[in-house]
């Protein structure tokens, strides 16, 4: 897998475990291949997800997929099924039908 873009969907990417995955660190390592989308943050940090701005998030994700093809959604949760990434992915797929 070689994604064209890593889309950070964390609500607050400024602090991370050991500092490895902070917004600043990822911007330095990935450059233009990194984008933080604050509208996609899960403000409750629980499931079901409550995105900061669901409509804008899904619209932006679809647009990024159209432009970049393969993108990766990044969050701090290790298990995608326990993370709001799965919710975003599901909603984007539903809109494609």
Image (spheres, rainbow, N blue to C red):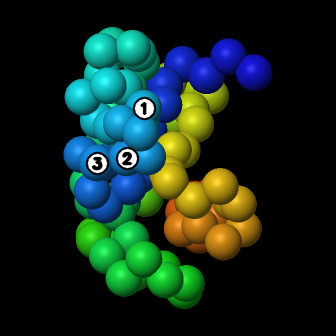
Residue 93 in view (yes/no) = no
Residue 38, percent across and down?
26, 54
Residue 83 position within the rendered picture, expressed as x and y whole percent measured from the top left: 59, 67
Out of 55 and 27, give the one closest to the viewer: 27
* Secondary structure found at label 2: loop
Q: Which residue is mark 1?
A: 20
Q: Please tell me whether mark 3 sits on a helix, a strand or a loop.
A: loop
In which quarter of the view is residue 55 placed? bottom left
Q: Earlier in the sequence, mark 1 or mark 3?
A: 3
State the residue position of label 3: 15
The structure residue drawn at horizontal position 49% and vertical position 51%, both measured from the top left corner, is: 75
**Above or below 52: residue 63:** above
Question: Tags 2 and 1 in contact by the CB under 8 Å rule?
Answer: yes
Q: Is residue 7 above or below residue 11?
A: above
Do the CB atoms of the residues marked 3 and 2 lie less than 8 Å apart?
yes
Few, some or many residues within 10 Å of mark 2 (<14, 14–19, 20+) = few
Cα distance between the residues tagged 1 and 3: 9 Å
How far apart marks 3 and 2 lie (CA) works out to 4 Å
Image-quadrant location for residue 87: bottom right
Judging by the rendered image, the residue that carries numbered circle 2 is 16
Mark 2 and mark 1: Cα distance apart in space: 7 Å
């Amino acid at each position: 897998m070689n994604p064209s873009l890593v889309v950070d969907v964390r609500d607050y990417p400024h602090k991370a475990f050991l500092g490895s995955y902070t917004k600043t660190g990822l911007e330095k390592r990935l450059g233009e291949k990194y984008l933080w989308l604050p509208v996609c943050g899960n403000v409750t940090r629980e499931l079901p997800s409550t995105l900061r701005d669901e409509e804008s998030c899904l619209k932006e994700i679809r647009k990024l997929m159209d432009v970049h093809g393969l993108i990766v959604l990044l969050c701090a949760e290790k298990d995608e099924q326990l993370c709001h990434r799965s919710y975003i992915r599901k909603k984007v797929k539903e809109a494609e039908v």
